[in-house]
Image (tube, rainbow, N blue to C red):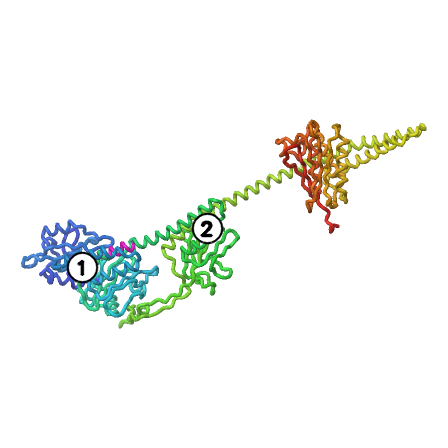
Amino acid sequence: MIGAIQPIGCLIAVDAGSLTIEYASTNTRVYFGRDYTSLLGLPLAELLGADGCATLLARRLAPTVPDLLRPTLLQIRSDDGEPIELECLPHRFGDWLVLEFVEPESRSGSVWDDEVLRQRVISELIIPDTLEDLAQVGAQILREATGFDRVMIYRFAADQHGEVIAESTVRPDSFLGLHYPASDIPDPARRHFARNVIRVIADINAKPVPIMTRSGVVADAGSQAPLDLTYSKLRAVAPVHIEYLNNMGVAGSVSISLISENKLWGLVACHHYSPLELSWSRLRACELIGGTISALLHSLENTSQLRASIRAEKTAYAIEREARSGQPLRETIEAHADDLLNQLSAQGMLLKLADEVLAIGKVPAGDIDYAPLAARMSSGIATSDHLQELVGVEVLGNDIAGAAMMELSEDRSDWLILFREAFGETIRWAGKPEKIEIRKEDGSTRLSPRGSFALWLEERRGHSKPFTETDGEILRITRRALFAVNSLDRERAATAAMRRAEAEEARLRLVLMDAAQDRSLGELASALAHELNQPLSAVSNYVNASRQEMRNHGIVVPPNIAGLMESAVSESARAADLVRRLRNFIGQREITLEQVDLQAVVRQGVELALAASNEPSPEIVFEFADDIPPISADPVQIVQVILNLARNSITAMAGSQVRRLTLSIRNASPLVEITIHDTGTGVPQDMEDTLFEPFHNSTTSGMGLGLSLCRSIVEAHGGRISMQENDTGATFVFTLRITDPDDA
C-alpha cells in the first residue's frame, strides 16, 4: 500500500467490472503523451482500443504462484491520435486490473545474446553435483548476463538468517561466507519474495512516482481507497529498505527468489554501486536462470536426502531381518551402532530397554533426566542442538551438546538417544546483527537498519550442528524399524512369561496331585501296617508258643529246628520294623540316617528278592568299585529299593533264555551311582512316561506302588532315579549322596 512506483515505467489500475480507469501514476505523459488527470474515469478501450482491450482480457491475468514476468506489447493512443507501442506487465488482483507500462526493448542484438545465455544455462548449470558448486555457477552466469558489480546467493537457515554460499564480483571485497541476520529481511518482505520471483530497483534514490485516485489523493495506506501493489513489478521502495541499501553503498539491485517445494529457500541478490536499469527481456532471462537454479537445488537436495534415506533404509532392513531371526534388539543395536551413529553424524548413544541402559561411544556423564527433551517429542522424535539449555546441566561431559531422541515403545519407557559433540563455530556477520533505535522529533522511536556492514565475528559455543530435515527423515526411518523390533521383543517376552506361568501352574497342579497321592499312600500304608502287624505278631507268637509247648511235653528240639524257629521269630520282627519304617516314610517322609556299608545293603536286598521270588534264581553279577566311600542312609529303606528293583528284574527275566542280573556301584563324586541291569523283556515304550507314578504297574501283578516308592525313597535321600535306554532288558540307575566328612 505504498501508493507509488519507480520512475522506470507508469501504471494505471482499472475496475475489473466496468473497465474504467480508477488509478494512474502521475508520469503517464512520459509514456502515453497524455496527462494522468485526463485518464482517470476514462474507459480502458479509449486508451487501448477495442482490439487492445480484447487482446489484454484474453490473457491469463491472475497471478501465478509465485508470480512471473508476463509482458505483452500493447498500442496506446496518444492525445494526437498517434499509436505508441509499449511493453505491458498486466495482472488482476482483487477487483482491479493493474497495468504497468515500460519502454519496449530494442531488439537489435538481443536475440543473439539471449540465445547464448540460454545455451549457458543448459550446458553449465546441469554439470554441478553439489549445491555449493551449482550456486557458484549460477552466480557467475547471472553477473556476466546482467553486468552487476556483485551477485550473491543466500541460503536461509532454520532460524531464517541468511548465509552467502556463492558470490561473483568485480570488486576487491568479498561477502562469501558472511551471515546476515533474519531481521534484515522482515516477514512482510519474505512473503513478497515468496509471491514474486523477481524484484527490480533500478535506482535506489530515484524519486518515486505517486499513484493518484479519481478523487485526487495518493492511493497509499493513508487514503480511503489504497491500491494493493503486492504483485506490482514497478512498486516503489520502502524508505527503510532505501536506508538499508544506502548504508551498504548499493545504488541499484535485483533480487531473484529461489523457491523449493513452495518455500523460500534463498535469494539471489544482485548489487550495483551505481544505478543500473536492465531490459525487461534480460530480467525475464534472470527469472529463467533463477527458476532453473531453484529446480536444480530442489533436485540436488532431494538426491542427497534420497541417498541418506536409502542408507537408513538398508540399516533398518538389516535390523528387521536380524530381529526376525530371533536376535534381541539390544544385540542388534550393538551390532549396527557404527551405522546408526555415522548416518546421523553422532558420536554416542544411550539405549534404554526396560530397566537396562546401554551406553556406546561418547555420552553425557552422570545421571541426567532427559524428560525435558522427551517433552519436545513429535511423532516419537525429539531433537535439540543445545541440550544443556534443556536438561539444565552445566557440564554434560565429553563435549556433548546436541541430542536426538526416539521413543521405542507405546508407554514411552524405552528410548534411544543419539548424541552430537559441541560444534565450535565462528559466525562471520556482515556487521553487528542489531537494529539501531532512532528517536524522532515527535518523541517516538523507530528501528533503523544497521548502519555498519563491517565484518563482525560471533563465537557460538555449547551447540551441536543443527538437525536438518534429512536428519529428521533418517530418524523417522530408524525409529520405525527399532519400534517394530522392540514391539516384537516385548511380544516374545510376554509370550515366554505366559508360558512360564502356565508351566508353573502345571507344576503346582502336579505338586498338589502328588500331595494328594502321597496322602492316599500314607493312609494306605497306615492301613497296611496295621493289618500286617497283627499277623506278623501272631506268627512270632505262634512260633514262640510252639517252642514252649514242645518243652512242656519234654520234647527236645533239635538245634537246626531251634535255629529255624529263632530265624522265623527274628524275620517276623524285622518285617514288622520294615512295615513301620515304610509307613513312617510314606506318611511323614521320615528317614533314619546312619553310616552304612552300601555293598552289604545291596547284597541283602538281592537276597530278599531271591527269597521272595518263586522264579528260578538268575545269574547274579556284582560289579563293585574299590573306591566306594561311606554314605549316610536309612539301610532299611535302601534295602527296600534294591528289593523292589531286583524283584521286578527277576520277574521280567522269567521267559528269557539268558537270565542275568547285574548290580554295580561306582563313585560319581559327590554321589555314588547304583545300577541294576537285567536281560529281561524291558519296559514297554508306552509305560516309560508313567513308570515312577503310583498305581501304574511295570509288571503283570501288584498295585503299581513299587517304583513310585523307590523314587520317593531315593529323592528323600537327595538322589535321583531313572531308567536308561538299553538294547536288551532294562537298566535302572539311582544315586545317593556321599557322606561329607565335615557334616555333623
Name the spot of residue 318 as percent of width and height, x first. 43, 48
Q: At numbered mark 2, what does the secondary structure look like: helix, strand or loop? A: loop
User: Toward the viewer: 75 or 440?
Assistant: 75
Q: Residue at x 72, y 49 (%)?
A: 740
Residue sitting at the far right: 554
- Is 5 covered by the magenta stretch? no
Q: Residue at x 77, y 36 (%)?
A: 578
Name the spot of residue 688 as percent of width and height, x first. 63, 33
Q: Which residue is mark 2?
A: 408
Q: Which residue is mark 1?
A: 282
Disc 2 marks a residue whose amino acid type is Leu
Q: Residue at x 14, y 63 (%)?
A: 26
Disc 1 marks a residue whose amino acid type is Arg
Segment colored magenta:
290-298
How many other residues sit within 10 Å of disc 2, few (<14), some (14-19) or many (≥20)? many
Q: Is residue 444 visible?
A: no
Name the spot of residue 516 as percent of width and height, x first. 67, 36
How many other residues sit within 10 Å of disc 1, few (<14), some (14-19) or many (≥20)? some
